[in-house]
Amino acid sequence: MRHKIKKLIRGDFPEEEINRLAFPAIIASIAEPLISLGDNMIIGTFSPPGENYIGAVSLASSLFLTIVWVFAQTRTAISALISRFYGEKRLDEMRTLVPQVIFMNFLLGLFFYLITTLFASEIFSFYNAQGRLHEIAVEYYSIRALGLPLSLATYLIFGVFRGIQNTFWAMVIALIGGGVNLLLDLILMGGVEGWLDPQGIKGIAWASVAAQLVMLILAIGVMYRKTIFRLNFMYEVNKQIYTLLAFTGNLIIRSLSVQTAYFFSNRVAAGAGDMFMNVQGVFFQIWLFAAFVVEGYCSAGNALAGKFYGEKNHEMLWRLGKFMSVRTLLIGIGLGLFFLIIYPWVHIPFLTDTREIELFQNVFWVVILVLPLNAFAFVYDEMLKGMGRMAYLRDTLLISTFLGFVPTVLFLEYVEWHLHAVWLAFVVWIIFRGTRLMLYFNRNFRY
């Protein structure tokens, strides 16, 4: 393996540039999963016995992240466009596009805040949530959703940073946001004796909103100081917005396919009972954290693929793909081994009920199995995004979800495999997705 990597990086291959982009991008990418993990850890510590806080917060967070990931696809689209124009030395043509799209994302987030909070009760009923689980999910989401316009605008600015080949700024902002969230979680959930009464689940939600507001303010500040872009959106509509919307439309369809898989996974877990939903909530947060570590590294491939594609440097594009696939596979295997080593203790910050712990131990090995498989899917997914191959990515996710995940989870749930059904379906989903993308890249970009 080491010989293969050395062979790939001989000559002028930009390994240092990949590392410069990749490692900060990992931190920036896991900002939201870290916030959700932090929420669940604090909830597990302070929540009253018998309350379904973890399952409810995981369900509400899943809806929140669904909207963010679907409509934050403009981040990927703007990153692909800017990295291409950056490679072509035409970045100034993007000057008016960026503020227009930031404003569009903010309004989109505001719209979905109003719609989803208005129908929050019906939405969570559709997820199979009932009783106290349903009540807590609605209560938490009604506050957390205030962060939708903030998150969509922030992620768009992060995409701008990545497009101009800088992921360090987003990393610093994400770390500060995560720190603010954790500190406020502790203060608001548990209260401060003599000064502030415990706020419970509402405190956790307000902590997340505050962290997202801090991140948006910092992102705007960095954009003003470090880039040519400003917030003046009252220009004539930039002609590239139509290309951006075409990219975004395909990515939204693709993302809706992903969220269909997430919806079925949560619906199956909630339908099996509160115990299953609590454990599924922990699985989902751990998997998202690990997946976004891998995707964060792959985002360097996204930025550089767009740049090389804009420069028409096909040899470097091919070498980049092979290098990133090897490195990402090693990261995926490393994450899997890490969770295998700590297998007996992973549940401790989250679960205390003995039945939930037993269920966790019985199923967690399947979650770990998904982690190395993520490597093949994410590395080619990010590179093809950078090159603007959005239609193929859309079709791949439609096939993987509706011919892979959905039939698998429905059949295995029919035979009452419950959480095993969910995570074995994710294994099938990732294999479908990764194989199709890898074959496409090798067929079209071999040099």
Image: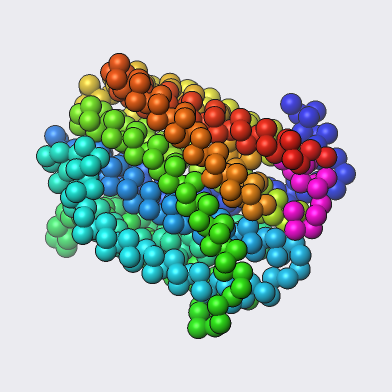
The magenta-colored residue range is: 309-321
133 on left or right of 95: left
Q: In the image, what residue occupies the spot 76% across and 68% down? A: 89
Q: Measured along the vertical axis of the image, is residue 7 above or below residue 298?
A: above
Q: In this view, does 28 lie above or below 45?
A: below
Can you give x and y, in whole percent of width and height, for residue 277 in the image?
26, 33
Locate the N terminus by quadrant.
Answer: top right
Q: In this view, does 128 lie above or below 237?
A: above
Q: Does the magenta stretch include residue 307?
A: no
What residue lies at 76% left-to-right and 46% top-to-bottom? Answer: 317
Q: Quadrant of the C terminus?
A: top right
Instruction: Residue lying at the far top in this picture: please name it.
Output: 415
Task: From the image, give the main secondary structure of the stretch colored magenta.
Answer: helix
Residue 73 place in picture, x, y as percent: 50, 55
Residue closest to the eye, 35 or 344: 35
Q: Which residue is drawn at 29% across and 58% down?
A: 145
Horizontal and vertical percent for residue 83?
Answer: 67, 60
Q: In this view, does 140 lie to the left or right of 386?
A: left
Task: Tell me the residue at 70%/50% (across/down).
Answer: 305
Instruction: Confirm whether the magenta stretch covers residue 310.
Output: yes
Q: What sort of colour scheme is used for the picture?
A: rainbow
Q: Depth check: 193 or 302 in front? A: 302
**Residue 374 in view in this figure:** no
Query: Which image quadrant is residue 49 in?
Result: top left
The answer, for residue 204, to whether it is visible in the render is: yes
User: As rendered, which of 192 and 15 lies closer to the eye?
Assistant: 15
